[in-house]
């Protein structure tokens, strides 16, 4: 394993949750620094960002998800996904990265000063700061895979993005434009100008107008908000159109958003229009596609607020309200700078 001088320390600061609960259960603690396996790199995290999945991991809801997360308490005290940082050490089998390389990606346990990762990361877009790069992985991969893979979006098609102003939505508007689509974005009043500036051709303010009564028809509905039933959504879908379900309101504690996804899937069994749900997958190839889109300037991260690592509870509290504008990022200052 190649190491640099800073790898001598055995501890690191990380945000931990010993039990499920509200953001108040979070503690900033000194924990063991991970050691990279032979096929992994050790990354010093410079920035991370919060996603709704972190909210679910914090609160332990919906309960059905505890089958994966741990029934009575979290299987791992560490959590968080998105990161951007600098490779500090590489395992003996790693040939494509070296100490000093700037990278971004996702792995569990990213609310920490270091992560050891084998996959799910790639070179950081050169034109982005660490904060901007940390805003990208989960949200932008979800937007890309939802539009391109699940929605099979083609140039010239009409796409409606419901929930266009948050983490996933702000990337989805820009990626849909980059894929050559005509984009209609649905958001609340305060975000109308933002989503227009991201390239949306039409904007519907959901506080004034119900998009399911607009009379327009779409080839693809990327539903990030999950605010409408299938019977309403299908009114605006072309006969061969697809509804791609990305997110939904928090729902009850047992099923959470899954209740909405199951209801829509069952209701959509008959008929020519399709409804699909998917979970985005982190992979280097799609991170490379995003890097190109970001470096070409076709896609830009929208960052509403910045926090320090010790303020993650505040970031999650705000995210949990469900009205973040773009992304909320967390900056990690190096130890010398903290003194
Ligand atoms: N399937 C997957 O793999 C995957 C991956 C990532 C995220 N997700 C899910 O996707 C959803 C969004 O994630 P995110 O990171 O974008 O969350 P976020 O950053 O918290 O954004 C939520 C956005 O939803 C908008 N919104 C709230 N109510 C709305 C309504 N009735 N109509 C239209 N927009 C509404 C809000 O805008 P206003 O302030 O304008 O209301 C806000 O900008 C979550 O449910 C998350 O769990 C799924």
Image: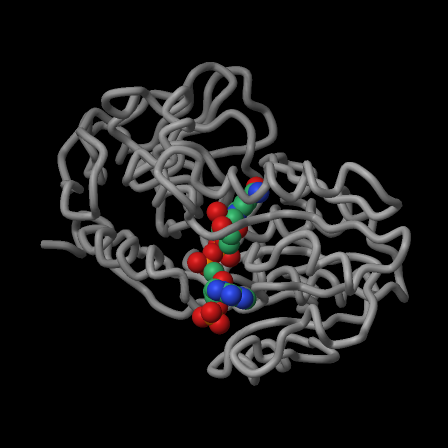
Residue 291 location (% of width, % of height)? 64, 52
Residue 160 location (% of width, % of height)? 72, 65
**Residue at 82%, 39% in the rendered image:** 270
In the image, residue 48 above or below residue 127: above
Residue 313 location (% of width, % of height)? 22, 52
Q: Is residue 31 visible?
A: yes
- By what rule are the colours in the image chosen? one colour
| Residue sitting nearer the eye, 28 or 238 | 238
Residue at the left extreme?
339
**Residue at 31%, 24% in the rendered image:** 34
Residue 335 location (% of width, % of height)? 18, 47
**Residue at 52%, 62% in the rendered image:** 128
| Residue sitting nearer the eye, 57 or 265 | 265
Q: Say left or right for 219 vs 230.
A: right
In the image, residue 228 above or below residue 334: below
Q: Say left or right for 183 vs 154.
A: left
Q: Say left or right for 176 vs 318.
A: right
- Which quadrant of the figure contains the C terminus? bottom left
In the image, residue 286 above or below residue 164: above
Q: Is residue 138 visible?
A: no
Image quadrant in which you'd find residue 233: bottom right
**Residue at 24%, 28% in the rendered image:** 77
- Which quadrant of the figure contains the N terminus? top left
Image quadrant in which you'd find residue 236: bottom right
Q: Say left or right for 209 vs 220.
A: left
């Amino acid at each position: 394993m190649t190491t640099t001088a800073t790898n001598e320390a055995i501890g690191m600061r990380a945000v931990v949750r010993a039990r499920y609960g509200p953001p108040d259960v979070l503690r900033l603690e000194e924990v063991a620094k991970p050691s990279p396996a032979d096929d992994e790199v050790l990354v010093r995290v410079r920035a991370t960002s919060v996603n709704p999945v972190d909210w679910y991991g914090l609160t332990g809801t919906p309960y059905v998800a505890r089958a994966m997360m741990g029934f009575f308490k979290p299987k791992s005290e560490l959590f968080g996904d998105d990161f951007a940082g600098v490779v500090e050490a590489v395992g003996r089998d790693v040939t494509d990265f070296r100490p000093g390389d700037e990278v971004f990606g996702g792995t569990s346990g990213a609310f920490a000063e270091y992560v050891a990762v084998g996959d799910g990361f790639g070179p950081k877009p050169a034109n982005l700061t660490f904060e901007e790069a940390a805003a990208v992985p989960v949200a932008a991969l979800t937007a890309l895979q939802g539009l391109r893979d699940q929605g099979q979006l083609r140039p010239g098609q009409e796409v409606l993005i419901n929930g266009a102003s948050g983490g996933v939505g702000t990337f989805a508007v820009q990626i849909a434009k980059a894929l050559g689509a005509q984009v209609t974005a649905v958001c609340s009043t305060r975000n109308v100008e933002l989503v227009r500036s991201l390239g949306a051709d039409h904007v519907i303010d959901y506080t004034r107008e119900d998009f399911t009564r607009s009379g327009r028809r779409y080839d693809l509905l990327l539903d990030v908000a999950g605010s409408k039933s299938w019977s309403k959504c299908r009114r605006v879908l072309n006969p061969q159109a697809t509804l791609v379900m990305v997110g939904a309101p928090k729902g009850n504690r047992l099923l959470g958003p899954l209740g909405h996804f199951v209801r829509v899937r069952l209701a959509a069994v008959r008929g020519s229009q399709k409804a699909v749900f998917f979970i985005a997958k982190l992979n280097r190839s799609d991170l490379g596609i995003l890097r190109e889109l970001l470096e070409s300037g076709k896609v830009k991260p929208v960052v509403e607020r910045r926090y320090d690592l010790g303020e993650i509870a505040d970031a999650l509290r705000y995210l949990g309200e469900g009205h973040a504008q773009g992304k909320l990022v967390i900056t990690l200052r190096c130890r010398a700078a903290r003194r």
